[in-house]
């Protein structure tokens, strides 16, 4: 069986987890958490990076930092994971869904302005497949209308837009280190705080509403409960696992990009014949090969392809059921404008096996199977 995903493992994980255990410091914010956040701050030129318990809770933190009031609206694509939406619904916002661009499956930046009302508070840019949204346009719209921008960069660790790391362009960026993502700690994530004025509140929210971070820095002589909060910090055991990935981030990235390119090259002629549509990476965007997807002609053909691959012991999957048509989406949101591409394009999309360490042999089997399906 060729799996759809294998969690990344570089071989140094047990050593670092052992070090964490031996240090008798297994709660959050120990040496591995510090190493991971310092590495990301330096590598991505991020003002402040805080590890979280998941990509979902990184989004929750971003939402709390937006200080939403009941009735406030948040603009986001409908083609995304439920966490992108829940983070804002959890804290009282109404969702306003905007259509995606068919080439990248990212929010269509040209349709955002029409979705803005007097209640709009924020725009969420989810970088699908690690390919950047059109951030210059999105940031210009946000500045003009005084809106916050949250980058859901869960899939986009190590991707860039015009040379800048994704997650560092908006006010807040959110990474995921779930086992299905490029770099993993089992369950985990990070929030990137790009506007310095939010750092202190972010530290407080993350540490149960206390000013513990200031206490540890010696800025106050005892720590106390000062604000809303939760426990958003991961254990050192998870951070130790992540460190084993981050120290080899370039090797992991190169390996994934190689697999991505092999798929792309192998299917180029299928696209020329009009049998499939391949992903687009716009100029100025450098992606991280988070996933390889292709688009079939329609839903029926996609179902047939997935069944065909399964019969050959290959797991291929699809996602997302557009949020605006899901039960919770109907309750918490509305679609602005027309759904031209969201439903149509998501129905056609299929993701092929893609992970660090995918062997050339296994990949050749996947490629052969897809070509056989199309009879080429
Ligand atoms: C994976 C993912 C999340 C959630 O991350 P978790 O770490 O699983 O909580 C959020 N948004 C997007 C776009 C994702 O792909």
Image: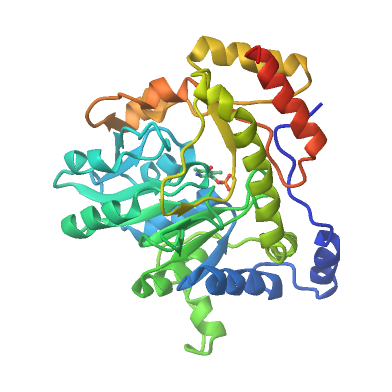
Rendered residue at 47%/36% (across/down): 82
Q: How many marks?
A: 0
Q: Quadrant of the N terminus?
A: top right
Rendered residue at 50%/35% (across/down): 279
Residue nearest the viewer, comparing 42 with 162: 162
- Residue 213, position as x, y percentages in the image: 52, 78
Q: From what the image shows, is residue 64 above or below residue 204?
A: above
Q: From what the image shows, is residue 267 above or below residue 24?
A: above
Q: From what the image shows, is residue 372 above or below residue 31?
A: above
Q: Quadrant of the C terminus?
A: top right
Rendered residue at 17%/55% (across/down): 145
Residue nearest the viewer, comparing 305 with 152: 305
- Residue 212, position as x, y percentages in the image: 53, 77
- Residue 31, position as x, y percentages in the image: 70, 75
Q: Is residue 292 visible?
A: yes
Examine the image and state in which quarter residue 111 appears.
top left
- Residue 329, position as x, y percentages in the image: 37, 29
Rendered residue at 67%/46% (across/down): 258
In the image: residue 277, left or right of residue 195:
right
In the image: residue 369, left or right of residue 108:
right
Q: Which coloring applies here?
A: rainbow
In the image: residue 119, left or right of residue 323:
left
Residue nearest the viewer, comparing 200 with 373: 373
Q: Quadrant of ligand 1?
A: top right
Examine the image and state in which quarter residue 369 appears.
top right
Q: Is residue 226 visible?
A: no
In the image, farthest residue toward the left: 118
């Amino acid at each position: 069986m060729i799996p759809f995903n294998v969690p990344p493992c570089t071989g140094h994980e047990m050593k670092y987890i052992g070090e964490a255990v031996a240090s008798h410091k297994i709660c959050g914010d120990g040496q591995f958490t510090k190493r991971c956040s310092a590495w990301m701050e330096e590598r991505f030129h991020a003002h402040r990076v805080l590890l979280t318990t998941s990509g979902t809770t990184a989004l929750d933190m971003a939402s709390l930092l937006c200080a939403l009031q009941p009735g406030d609206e948040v603009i986001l694509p409908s083609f995304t994971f439920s966490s992108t939406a829940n983070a804002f619904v959890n804290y009282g916002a109404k969702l306003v869904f905007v259509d995606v661009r068919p080439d990248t499956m990212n929010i269509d930046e040209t349709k955002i302005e029409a979705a803005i009302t007097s209640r709009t508070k924020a725009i969420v840019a989810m970088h699908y497949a690690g390919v950047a949204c059109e951030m210059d346009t999105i940031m210009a719209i946000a500045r003009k209308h005084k809106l916050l921008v949250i980058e859901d960069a869960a899939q986009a660790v190590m991707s860039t837009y015009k040379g800048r790391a994704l997650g560092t362009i908006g006010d807040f960026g959110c990474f995921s280190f779930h086992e299905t993502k490029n770099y993993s700690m089992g369950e985990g994530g990070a929030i990137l705080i790009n506007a310095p004025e939010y750092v202190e509140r972010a530290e407080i929210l993350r540490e149960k509403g206390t000013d513990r971070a200031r206490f540890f820095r010696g800025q106050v002589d005892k720590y106390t409960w000062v604000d809303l909060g939760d426990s958003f910090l991961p254990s050192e055991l998870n951070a130790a696992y992540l460190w084993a990935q981050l120290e080899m981030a370039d090797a992991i990235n190169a390996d994934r990009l190689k697999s991505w390119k092999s798929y792309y090259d192998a299917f180029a002629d299928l696209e020329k014949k009009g049998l499939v549509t391949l992903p687009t990476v716009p100029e100025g965007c450098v992606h991280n090969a988070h996933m390889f997807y292709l688009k079939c002609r329609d839903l029926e053909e996609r179902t047939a392809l997935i069944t065909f691959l399964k019969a050959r012991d290959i797991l291929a999957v699809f996602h997302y059921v557009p949020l605006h048509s899901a039960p919770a989406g109907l309750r918490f949101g509305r679609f602005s404008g027309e759904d031209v591409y969201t439903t149509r394009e998501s129905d056609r999309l299929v993701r092929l096996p893609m992970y660090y360490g995918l062997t050339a042999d296994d990949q050749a089997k996947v490629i052969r199977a897809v070509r056989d399906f199309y009879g080429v």
